[in-house]
Image (spheres, rainbow, N blue to C red):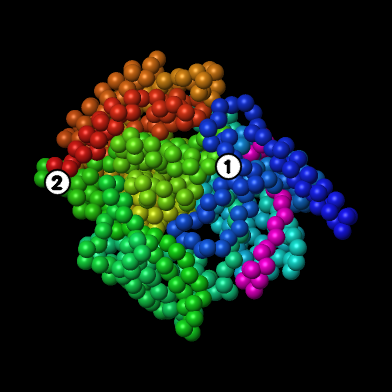
Amino acid sequence: MKKNFYLSLLLALCATTTFAQWKPAGDRIKTKWAEEIDVKNVLPEYPRPIMERSDWKNLNGLWNYAITEVGKSAMPATFDGQILVPFAVESSLSGVGKTVGAEKELWYQRTFDVPQAWKNKKVLLHFGAVDWKTDVWVNDVKVGSHTGGFTPFAFDVTAALNNKGDNKLVVKVWDPTDDGYQPRGKQVKRPEGIWYTPVTGIWQTVWLEPVANHYITDLRMTPDIDKNTLSVKVSTDNVHPSDIVEVKVFDGTQLVATGKSINGETVEVAMPENVKLWSPDSPFLYTLKVALKNGGKLVDEVNSYTAMRKYSTKRDANGIVRFELNNKPQFQFGPLDQGWWPDGLYTAPTDEALLYDVQKTKDFGYNMIRKHIKVEPARWYTHCDQVGIIVWQDMPSGDRNPQWQNRQYFNGTEMKRSAESEACYRKEWKEIMDCLYSYPCIGTWVPFNEAWGQFKTPEIVEWTKQYDPTRLVNPASGGNHYTCGDMLDLHNYPAPDMYLYDAQRANVLGEYGGIGLVLKDHIWEPNRNWGYVQFNSSDEVTDEYVKYANKLYDLIARGFTAAVYTQTTDVEVEVNGLMTYDRKVIKLNEQKLKAINKKIVDSLNK
């Protein structure tokens, strides 16, 4: 007994020492939430609230890591130290703060146990997102691989698990950043200006989930407010003709609608006559219970939510094509949101931090966010659903850029991607649309930003529109312009301007503003800080913002039906945020900001 006692004590002391050794890397600015991180309980919230099961196990925390030369197939015999998952290796919160690059590979290793209660169940290993190419082993058995830096993936690891005791998990990641053609957004090897630090490896929650031998894999929910129906396509690991899928819709605790299907058919639910619609002013969400039954027995069940809403365009009395929400005109106005953090890079330090940017956007009087060439964790979109924010979702850009002509319709030569590059784009864009399809907040898909990696625009836009006809498609925000999709999107810095007009589509100002203010205790670097214009005080920035907003307001009558201000926060050396990069200072007068924003948002509600 004594021997066992001392062994347990030694292990406990080693664990305590290990946790005590972790600290953020580097000395750059950090958010207040960085101080709240508990390495034994990192991002503990359920990672996929739109399809939730009650039982799961979080694998975030301290893992071993090693950086090796690319191409070595053998797992490292020793490791370089510990990394805090799910923060990218380049980030401060990883505790590492090292770059990797195309010539190296990043290895992760940890052990985990499987709860006894999961006996006789399948075990799925989930990754929220890993940038970019991922290979995974459990107990030295290869269980799967994945490419793509922005979407979730999972492997059934049941057959590789030990019957008793710990299991070894090893992950290898290769990410060429801007040496590759893959979608990467604003990541570059040499950050400067509007280009930021690379993000390599695991950057969203890693978790285990027990499921039945036959289980639900995905929900695809499509509301139709004109027919007052909700369609729910329930995917399973395989189709059994004897399966019955049942969907129950609740308003709070009250059951208001049900529907069933067999043979893998979509469940068509007739919603109540007094259906409640979702909007930024009233972001009502119905809760769902989706059950998979076979032979009269419950096989699997997940909890979810949805909303009844409709995004469309319509010509108004003056002949101008306007955005509509739920068949009513709506001006959509919001900030360009990069989703970067000084301490976590792609990853917010806590869920409270993740919600903060969304809530402050709403507090500022906006009704929309343009999520700029990045995809967020699932919980971010749930926060937008709950708070009431419409999202324009960009496809992260990658590969090379063709000639950019932003003030006329494009008549040059488009970039020709390699077959591998084009296949990669199409695969990852489809995966992004698939994983975000059911979130009510998504109102617009943006396949290209400016001319960044732009190619085969009419073809990509047509496919996007056919694949999801329930959303609007912005063909190329500020990019090489073609007469396709639902809108013409102009970029103009710093002040709003309408230099092109399309009478057949909606006209939007996809970027403007960029008013800079340096606050010396809240900057990423002491030098190189820039905005499209710069001022020296909050009052000056506020006055300039209001001046631009009034100019935008005057352009609404001429045809603009949406606008995007650059930007939510400072990012690295960009100092043109409404807030500082560390989120500790709101740079503008918040009351004046909200008042003018409300005037713009309400401009079509007459």
Residue 584 position within the rendered picture, expressed as x and y whole percent measured from the top left: 47, 28
Residue range of the region highlighted in magenta in the rendering: 94-121
The tag on residue 229 is none
| Residue 241: x %, y % from top left | 46, 82
- Residue 482 drawn at (x, y percent): 31, 43
Q: How far is mark 2 from mark 1, CA to CA?
A: 45 Å
Residue in view at x 85 percent, y 51 percent: 6
Along the viewing direction, whichever of 431 and 463 lies nearer the viewer: 431
Q: Residues within 10 Å of mark 2 (few under 14, many from 20)?
A: few
Question: Residue, x 71% and y 65% (percent of image)?
Answer: 161
Identified at 26% across, 23% down, the residue is: 547
The amino acid at mark 2 is Asp
Q: Is residue 209 above or below residue 132?
A: below
Q: Residue furthest right?
A: 3
Residue positioned most to the front: 2
Q: Is residue 521 left or right of residue 125?
A: left
Q: Is residue 164 left or right of residue 548?
A: right
Of 597 and 337, the residue lying toward us: 597
Can residue 399 be seen at all in this image of the molecule? Answer: no
Q: Earlier in the sequence, mark 2 or mark 1?
A: 1
Q: Secondary structure at mark 1?
A: loop
The image quadrant of residue 577 is top left
Q: Secondary structure at mark 2?
A: loop
Q: Residue furthest bottom?
A: 295
Residue 372 sits above or below residue 164 on the image? above
Residue 355 vs 420, above or below: the answer is above
Residue position marked by numbered label 1 in the rendering: 180
